[in-house]
Image (cartoon, rainbow, N blue to C red):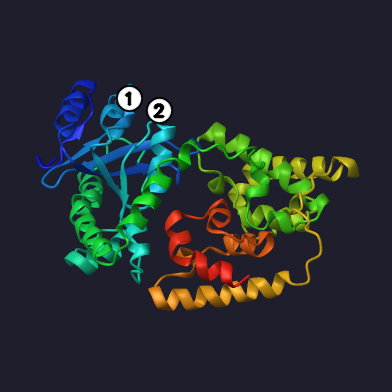
């Protein structure tokens, strides 16, 4: 292991590192997780970089990483992360850890309308650095980690602060730094936001809500069987049975094992190992009475409004103009779901517009008059 990025595997080592980083004004952070391979998603490696040094923290070798709370919550330390939403959620899952002050280089690139938003593309553009992609889907829960994997992980944060410097300078030059600060402030609260009742897992599968109630009953049983087996094996659910295969079996349930074996996504090993259990799940669903079939909750019904579509059309035309004027993506000016709410609720003032979920202060100030005028 290079002295430039030591691997921290002890509580004492982590305490020393925390003391070292407590005096840094800006630190880059990234995480590697097990979501692609394991049922229980967990943080398997944390990469931390200052302007000169990089460290790798191994959470699987430590009793906990609670000592990091001291620096993560320090408002004097800016944490530079690329696509922070995922990493912030993972830190919460790793022990309720919360970041107070974040700079998301992906969000910054969005606000600058960079043609490509990925970290690899931005490092290549600004520094001529080519990231090694060999370990993007590696199983980071396995130990020991190879020297090549550790070197790969260290590269993810080694240049993040330099990228942050370039993006921040451009944001300030364009007068968009206040936009970024508001977006960053919103980001740190997302993992801890109360989103209400979460949908059942089978309904979160893409395409599930297009199924009929009886087909949904089959999908629910198959999903329950898959989750139980994946948890027992500690394998990612898609490695047990793919979503597309489950949707296909739900739309047109096979009558027997022979028919099951003919389906795409059901290989010989899956048929031998899990075929009978899959058929039992399907049979349980098919035997359910109609009143026990799951049903998708339909979107809120609105009173008939003949002018709604025309208002929405005008709002989209205004957004198109604003995109060109300010050189921004449509979702940065106003996402579709926000435009829909504006068209339905017809806010008449900046305060009413600002009260809509998803609206930012900078959007209200810059685009509000044009959006309200379109109504």
Q: Position of residue 107 (x, y in %)?
A: 37, 57
Residue 276 image-quadrant placement: top right
- The residue depicted at 87 percent of the width and 42 percent of the height is 287
Q: Is residue 178 above or below residue 240?
A: below
**Residue with the mark numbered 2:** 95
Q: Residue at x 81, y 40 (%)?
A: 284
Quarter of the image that includes the C terminus: bottom right
Q: Secondary structure at mark 1?
A: helix
Question: For mark 1, does the 10 Å Cα neighbourhood hold few (<14), some (14 to 19), or many (20 or more) residues?
Answer: some
Residue 170 position within the rendered picture, expressed as x and y whole percent measured from the top left: 24, 64
Q: How many numbered circles does the render carry? A: 2
Q: Residue at x 75, y 41 (%)?
A: 281
Residue 307 seen in render: yes
Residue 4 is left or right of residue 39, and the answer is: left
Residue 289 visible in rendering:
no
Work out whether residue 166 or residue 90 is closer to the camera in this orientation and state it: 166
Mark earlier in primary sequence (1, 2): 1
Q: Is residue 82 above or below residue 2?
A: below
């Amino acid at each position: 292991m290079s002295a430039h990025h030591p691997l921290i595997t002890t509580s004492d080592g982590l305490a020393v590192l925390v003391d070292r980083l407590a005096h840094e004004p800006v630190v880059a952070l990234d995480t590697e997780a097990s979501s692609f391979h394991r049922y229980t998603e967990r943080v398997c490696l944390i990469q931390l970089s200052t302007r000169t040094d990089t460290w790798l923290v191994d959470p699987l070798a430590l009793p906990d990483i609670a000592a990091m709370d001291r620096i993560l919550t320090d408002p004097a330390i800016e944490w530079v992360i690329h696509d922070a939403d995922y990493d912030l959620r993972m830190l919460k899952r790793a022990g309720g850890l919360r970041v107070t002050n974040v700079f998301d280089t992906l969000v910054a690139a969005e606000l600058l309308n960079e043609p490509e938003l990925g970290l690899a593309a931005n490092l290549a553009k600004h520094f001529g650095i080519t990231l090694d992609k060999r370990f993007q889907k590696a199983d980071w829960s396995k130990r020991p980690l190879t020297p090549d994997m550790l070197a790969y992980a260290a590269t993810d944060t080694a240049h993040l602060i330099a990228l942050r410097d370039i993006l921040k300078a451009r944001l300030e030059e364009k007068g968009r730094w206040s936009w970024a600060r508001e977006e960053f402030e919103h980001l740190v609260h997302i993992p801890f936001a109360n989103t209400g009742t979460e949908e059942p897992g089978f309904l979160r599968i893409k395409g599930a809500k297009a199924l009929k109630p009886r087909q949904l009953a089959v999908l629910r049983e198959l999903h329950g069987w898959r989750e139980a087996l994946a948890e027992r094996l500690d394998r990612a659910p898609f490695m047990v049975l793919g979503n597309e295969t489950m949707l296909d079996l739900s739309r047109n349930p096979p009558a027997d094992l022979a028919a099951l074996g003919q389906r795409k996504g059901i290989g010989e090993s899956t048929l031998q190992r899990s075929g009978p259990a899959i058929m039992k799940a399907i049979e349980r669903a098919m035997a359910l009475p109609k009143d026990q079939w799951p049903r998708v909750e339909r979107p809120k019904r609105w009173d008939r409004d003949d002018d709604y579509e025309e208002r929405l059309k005008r709002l989209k035309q205004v957004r198109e103009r604003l995109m060109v004027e300010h050189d921004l993506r449509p979702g940065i000016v106003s996402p579709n779901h926000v435009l829909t709410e504006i068209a339905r609720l017809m806010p008449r003032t900046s305060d009413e517009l600002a009260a809509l979920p998803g609206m930012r202060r900078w959007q209200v100030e810059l685009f509000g008059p044009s959006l309200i005028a379109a109504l």
